Amino acid sequence: MTAPIFGSTRRFRTVMHLWPPYWGTGISVGEVAPDWRRLVVRMRQRFYNMNAFGTHFGGNLYAMCDPHYALLLIPLLGRGYQVWDKAAAIDFVQPGRGTVQAVFDWDDAQLEEIRARTADGAKFEPQRVVEVRDEAGAVVARVHKTLYVRRRAAS
């Protein structure tokens, strides 16, 4: 399975590595599963991505989580679907220091629910939560995402 906008997981990682909001903040896509079902994003703490308190800047914590559920869903569902981010919120749990990471994944049950709920052309707005964790595994932030998914009309 390939992503219509990136072609392969390798190309996707390259594009994300070169994407200015990521290289300018130290965010990197570390792993993308060959079947597009799992992705790991990491951010190392550097002098240029810290806030006034010496911890990760909250905007960067959100930025590392922003597009990935939607970007994974596009190749998983295929060209017959319209997918985009609709809403997001972030809960900061504790200050983030060092390297932080977030893991995004989609399983069969979630994908089947999306297909079933959009089969008649109706929109569906799945909600997902991803946790940003530090090197010790402690939760630094929770990002709540709402996606918009609709099956495209047959042409």
Image: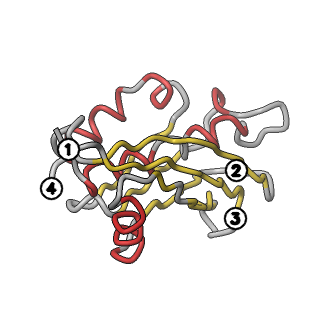
Compared to 2, does 114 lie above or below? below
Q: In the rendered structure, find residue 1 and report the number of the disc placed on it.
A: 4
Q: In the image, residue 3 lies at what x, y percent?
A: 22, 45
Is label 1 or label 2 in front? 1
Callout 3 touching callout 4 (CB < 8 Å): no
Q: Is residue 139 left or right of residue 84?
A: right
Q: Earlier in the sequence, mark 1 or mark 2?
A: 2
**Circle 1 crowding by C-alpha within 10 Å: few under 14, some 14–19, many from 20:** few
Q: Secondary structure at mark 2?
A: loop
Q: Which comes sooner in the sequence, label 3 or label 1?
A: 3
In this view, the residue in front, 142 or 51, is: 142
The circle on residue 97 is 2
Badges 1 and 2: C-beta atoms under 8 Å apart?
Answer: no
Name the amino acid type tagged 1. Answer: Ala
Mark identifier at residue 103: none
Give the number of the disc on residue 154: 1
The secondary structure type at the circle numbered 4 is loop
What residue is drawn where x is 64% and y is 26%? Answer: 48
- Gap between marks 1 and 4, in whole Å? 21 Å
Q: Are marks 3 and 1 in contact (CB under 8 Å)?
A: no
Label pair 1/4, CB-CB below 8 angstroms: no
